[in-house]
Amino acid sequence: TVSFGQSMFDKYEDMKDVSSGVINSKMFSMLATIDIDLDDPDAQKFMEMVKKIQSVKILSTGNSAISANMKADAEGHINKANLSELMRFKDGEQTVKFYVKEGKDENHVKELFMLISGLKELTKDSNIEINGEKREFETVVVSITGDIDLREISKITSTMNVPGGKNLEKVGKKN
């Protein structure tokens, strides 16, 4: 996780054709203090899960050259961090791959790493705009670190609109 956080992310986050985002543990701690209905079991589970997240880092690009480099760097991170493939999906040109670093048991991981590529066909006719520019995403890289319960993670990613998050429902069901 240090490799992704300090080298890959830093390398890409300031590039013109790259969109990036980071949410750190401090933000998750702040979320945990939000006034919620403590009688709601789903809200309680969500808050317990949020407290265990250290960071969410996202990189995305529609630039083909940057995309190729980003994928190569992501694969380098996967090897360096000794992540194991959890699952992968291919639908036409789109490929979604999930990798994990094992945690305290089979349902928990220290890092959930997603590499999503081939999105250009799906986004070219959409109206996705970032900073006033229409974007076609070719590659998206997402790293979520902490004490992650795979059975619950899709709730966080859907709440935060993390790219590829809807596929995480399949991860939770697999475990």
Image (cartoon, grey):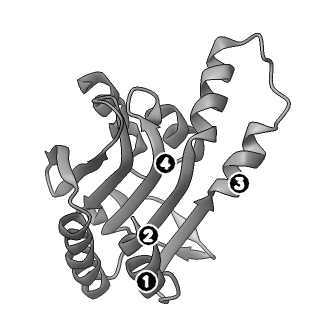
Residue at mark 4 to residue at mark 1: CA–CA distance: 22 Å
The mark nearer the N terminus, 4 or 3, is 3
Q: Which residue is mark 1?
A: 12
Q: Which residue is mark 4?
A: 146
Q: Is residue 147 visible?
A: yes
Amino acid beneath label 3: Met
Amino acid beneath label 2: Leu
The mark nearer the N terminus, 4 or 1, is 1
Residue 59 is marked as: 2
Q: In the rendered view, tell whether residue 18 sits above or below residue 94.
A: below
Q: Identify which residue is drawn at 45% across, 34% down.
A: 154
Secondary structure under the numbered disc 1 in the rendered image:
helix
Say if mark 1 contacts mark 2, CB within 8 Å: yes
Secondary structure under the numbered disc 3 in the rendered image:
helix
Tell me: 38 left or right of 43: right
Q: Residues within 10 Å of mark 4 (few under 14, many from 20)?
A: many
Tell me: 4 left or right of 133: left
Residue at mark 1 to residue at mark 2: CA–CA distance: 7 Å
